[in-house]
Image (tube, rainbow, N blue to C red):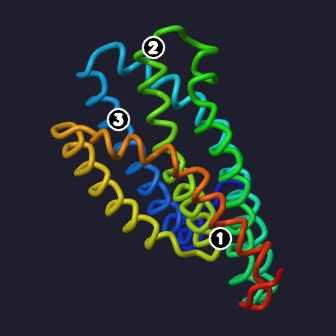
Amino acid sequence: HAYFSFPLREIRRILRIGLPSAGENICWWLAFIVVTAFIARMGPMALSTQAYVMQVGMWVVVFGMSLGFATEILIGHLVGAGDFEATYEAPLRTVRTGLLVVAVLMSVVALGAPRILGLFTRDASIIAGGALLLRMGFVLELGRLFNLVLVMALRATGDARFPLIMGVVTFAIRLSMIVLLGRVGVPALVQRALRFVPPAVLSAIILPDLLLKDGQLFL
């Protein structure tokens, strides 16, 4: 009889977390569909560029996802053990480590973007557009790491509503930026500035750990 029981109380508790979690993922996929629809209107060249960029960028995303899943499991154990101080510190420690890993990986990808894309295509337009997107993705992937680790940590504590709300807000911001950049384009000055983003961000992450100790300069 236990196989055919219908525990309503447990199901409600599962759905209270599961439905908002699904909603947050739905927001991400809706944004992806909208982005792809806009790109498809730009022609097959733009669609091919997106495909190559996504395949290259996914190698970096995998590291962020693995850190997020590991943190979610760890947070679940810590919450169950009642160690709330360690629960608070664990995702912050993961984010610090993850930022360094993702920054290094994206620096390699961003600086070597033309050569990496050249392994897949000889089309100069695709290589130039893809290199620009991968350099813009440097900042995006750092933000994605925050999203993956902290959202999964919140889910492990039972809070799935806040990630859903932020997913809706992010979708609105992303849609507005797509419409704006689709009309005005990316200025040449911004394109040139993006080349300096990887070394600048990587230096900002690494140098404080190397040169500062207890908040003071340590040489």
Residue 127, percent from left and from top: 49, 20
Q: Is residue 1 visible?
A: no
Task: Locate residue 185, reporting x and y percent.
Answer: 23, 38
Which residue is tagged 3? 33
- The quadrant where residue 152 appears: bottom right
Give the amino acid at mark 1.
Ala
Residue at the spot of label 1? 156
User: Quick one: quadrant of the N terminus?
Assistant: bottom right
Q: Looking at this rendering, what residue extends furthest in the front direction?
A: 219
Q: Is residue 36 left or right of residue 127?
A: left
Pick whichever of labels 1 and 2 is earlier in the sequence.
2
Left or right: 92 in relation to 159 = right
Type of residue at label 2?
Answer: Ala
Residue lying at 53% horizontally and 75% vertically, measured from the top left: 159
- The answer to which of marks 2 and 3 sits earlier in the sequence is 3
Residue density around tag 1, few if under 14, some if 14–19, many if 20 or more, within 10 Å:
many
- Could you say where residue 155 lies in the image, as x and y percent from the top left? 59, 68
Q: Is residue 7 above or below residue 137?
A: below
The amino acid type found where label 3 is placed reads Ile
Residue 165 appears in which quarter of the rendering?
bottom left
Q: Residue at x 63, y 45 (%)?
A: 106
Q: In 3D space, how far apart are the residues under numbered discs 1 and 3 (Cα atoms)?
A: 28 Å
Q: Which mark is residue 120?
A: none
Residue 59 left/right relative to 127: right
Q: Quadrant of residue 146?
A: bottom right
Q: Residues within 10 Å of mark 3 (few under 14, many from 20)?
A: few
Q: Position of residue 218 (x, y in %)?
A: 81, 84
Q: Observer-nearest residue: 124 or 82?
A: 124
In the rendered image, which residue does mark 2 sit on? 124
